[in-house]
Image: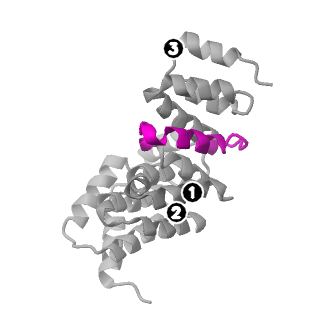
Amino acid sequence: MEEPAVDSGLVNKILTLLGKLADPQEAQVQKNFYKRDSNITLIGIKVPCIRKVVKDIVSSYTLHKKSILNVSEKLVSNKVHEYKMAGIILLELNKNKIIPSDLETIKRWFLNDYINDWAVIDTLCLAVISSLVEQSKEAQDTVMEWRKHENIYIKRASIVSFIKHAKRKELIDTLLRHASTFFGINHDLITKANGWLLREIGKSNPQKLEGFLTKNIKKIPRTTLRYAIEKFPETKRKWILKIPYK
């Protein structure tokens, strides 16, 4: 089916305006920041500038959900990081129109390798998927099931999408169990994200986190453990790190 002209026109307008803001010097600065991620192609536009361009352009359009998803997909499918971010920001600005069943579309973006760097993943999870998880138990269960997927980016999404929910008392036990399912995966994208989730849980319930960590100390990757205890007092951090783990 041929895409609507308004969708194609909106995509082209966003790409054109962002292209004019490309800054080779800023791109080099960002490349140094993302140096470990070879998937990222940068043209040097800061996120606030991307957000302003997208917000200003779409303010003159009345977009239905189908168009929002279509335009976002066209943007995230581009190899340029900043264009991908524009697609995520468009979703975020219209997240009140996105519903849990749209997770299938978002998952397809992962499978098509459109969402393939940690910065885009985390923005998508924190700005969009997290809200869907809050909307329904079905969405929560769906995203948790993503932990079983072989795609490493989908696995990371299954963690980061719950970062904003780490302080919800009714979810803490569920999230701790969820985190424990990743202990056998020794990959930076997982060990760091999992440590981040555990750290957030510990901000509201440090005693619970400490008990969980000491109980599972022999299973937890050291990177995850170090991230998880970052907010603990120094004496507590040193004590935990001295616990035999082999």
Image position of 186 with respect to 58: above or below:
above
Q: Please, what secondary structure does the residue beneath circle 2 have?
A: loop
How crowded pointer 1 is (Cα within 10 Å; few <14, some 14-19, many 20+) is rated as many
Q: What is the image's colouring?
A: one colour
> Mark 1–mark 3 contact, CB under 8 Å?
no
Which amino acid does the dot numbered 2 rest on?
Lys
Please report the bounds of the magenta region as a residue range: 164-190
> Of all residues shown, which one is farthest toward the right?
246
Select label 1 or label 3 by which is in front: 3
Looking at the picture, how far across and down is residue 226, in whole percent? 61, 26
Q: Is residue 117 visible from the viewing direction of this image? A: no
Quarter of the image with the N terminus is: bottom left
How crowded pointer 3 is (Cα within 10 Å; few <14, some 14-19, many 20+) is rated as few
Q: Please, what secondary structure does the residue beneath circle 3 have?
A: loop
Residue at image position (71%, 17%) is 243
Residue at image position (58%, 68%) is 112
Q: Between residues 3 and 204, which one lies in front from this camera angle?
A: 204
Q: Main secondary structure of the magenta part?
A: helix
Residue on which disc 1 sits: 116
Q: Between residues 57 and 70, which one lies in front from this camera angle?
A: 70
Residue on which disc 2 sits: 79
Image position of 26 with respect to 20: above or below:
above
Mark 2 and mark 1 lie on one chain; the one further toward the N terminus is: 2
How crowded pointer 2 is (Cα within 10 Å; few <14, some 14-19, many 20+) is rated as some
Select label 2 or label 1 by which is in front: 1
Image position of 79 with respect to 202: above or below:
below
Q: Between residues 188 and 178, which one lies in front from this camera angle?
A: 178
Residue on which disc 3 sits: 233
Q: Is residue 200 visible from the viewing direction of this image? A: yes
Select label 3 or label 2 by which is in front: 3
Mark 3 and mark 2 lie on one chain; the one further toward the N terminus is: 2
Q: Please, what secondary structure does the residue beneath circle 1 have?
A: loop
